[in-house]
Amino acid sequence: MPDWAFAAIPDLTGKRAIVTGATSGIGLETAAGLAGAGAEVVLTGRDAGKGSRALAEIHRRHPAARLSFALADQASLHSLAAFAAEIVASGATLDLLVNNAGVMGLSPRQETADGFERQFGTNHLGHFALTAQLVPALLRAPSPRVVTVASMAHRRGWLNFDDLQYERHYHPLRAYSQAKLANLVFALELARRCAAAGSRIASIAAHPGFARTGLFKGSLRARLALLVAPFFAQSATAGALPSLYAATAPEARNGGYYGPDGVGETQGNPAPAKIAARARDAAAAERLWRESEGLTGLRFPPLV
Ligand SMILES: NC(=O)c1ccc[n+]([C@@H]2O[C@H](COP(=O)([O-])OP(=O)(O)OC[C@H]3O[C@@H](n4cnc5c(N)ncnc54)[C@H](OP(=O)(O)O)[C@@H]3O)[C@@H](O)[C@H]2O)c1
């Protein structure tokens, strides 16, 4: 079990957090970790039944947890806009946004409600849109953080600007790797923009290593990966630690990327993780940002 554990999470009483895709796996464990440390947590997902079961599970572990569930479908810009508008209009302060929801290896190719390839749409564009629309609530907090969950798969990905939606030559895991590279490129670009603007917002990325979760149900190839899981994978609880570290550790910094420190970054203690050169390409990040604004029809508001 990693050294940096739930006990290291500082007291989060008075903080409010949103965790996307918190109905199972790493999102549920991240929400439980934050709630257990005293934060008020909004779990989001696309299935109200799963949402109720996730709330019950966290309450079972932490009876005093302050929790709610909200429907926010990462694969629908309309759903995300409605959710964000409600948060902003409520006047709520948002200390922490954890961009966690994801799908992997979908086969055959699927699309979101807005016609985006579903992995790029759910994992990247949905979080781009949600973050942009929650900036006003984040700016009400004294030191807000946006944590974006990427993956080691980003190292195998490239931004296919000629065909970001993989309309030609769709390959389930290449599309996943692109989406996870986009998550990391977005997190690092947001960090640069926050620093340049003198924003209080910190953008930090994390990855869980290899964790046994429902993520591997998307395709046969993804399910095959689970065959090696007994040798390399860690629990979803351990997989949530890098996200929790990024979200709460005083040492985690704007522009940082954290994952497990064990062999191949598959498991272990949260530590700075390897970033592929492609993810540091500032020109590609600028282009992805423009493309994401164009596709979502949203402009990021000022970060101060
Ligand atoms: N597990 C790993 O080894 C691993 C490795 C690297 C990165 N990651 C990343 O970790 C994150 C969490 O994945 P996980 O492993 O915990 O998988 P998981 O157990 O399948 O959890 C994914 C969560 O995202 C939700 N989700 C999917 N599509 C959604 C949508 N359209 N709207 C709202 N929520 C949606 C799922 O809800 P439903 O149940 O309704 O689908 C679920 O709650 C993902 O970003 C993934 O890419 C995981």
Image (cartoon, rainbow, N blue to C red):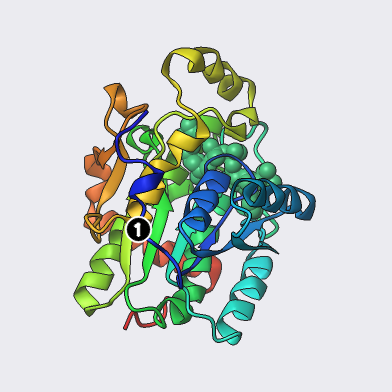
Q: Quadrant of the C terminus?
A: bottom left
Left or right of residue 98: residue 87: right
Q: Residue at x 45, y 68 (%)?
A: 13
Q: Amino acid at mark 1?
A: Pro
Left or right of residue 127: residue 107: right
> Residue 25 in the image: x percent, y percent?
57, 39
Location of residue 8 with respect to 194 vertically, above or below: above
Q: Quadrant of residue 221?
A: top right
- In this view, the residue farthest toward the front is 63
Q: Is residue 112 visible?
A: yes
Asked which secondary structure carries label 1, the reply is loop
Q: Residue at x 53, y 67 (%)?
A: 130
> Residue 134 in the image: x percent, y percent?
49, 74
Location of residue 14 with respect to 186 vertically, above or below: below
Ligand 1's quadrant is top right
Q: Is mark 1 within 8 Å of ligand 1?
A: no
Give whichever of 235, 281 is nearer the camera: 235
Q: Which residue is mark 1?
A: 10
Q: Quadrant of the N terminus?
A: top left
- In this view, the residue farthest toward the right is 49
Give whichever of 118, 51 is nearer the camera: 51
> Residue 181 in the image: x percent, y percent?
38, 44
Give whichever of 266, 52 is nearer the camera: 52
Count of residue discs? 1
Left or right of residue 39: residue 11: left
Left or right of residue 193: residue 5: right
> Residue 212 in the image: x percent, y percent?
54, 27
Q: Is residue 165 visible?
A: no
Rate crowding at label 1 as few (under 14), some (14 to 19) or many (20 or more) other CA atoms within 10 Å. few
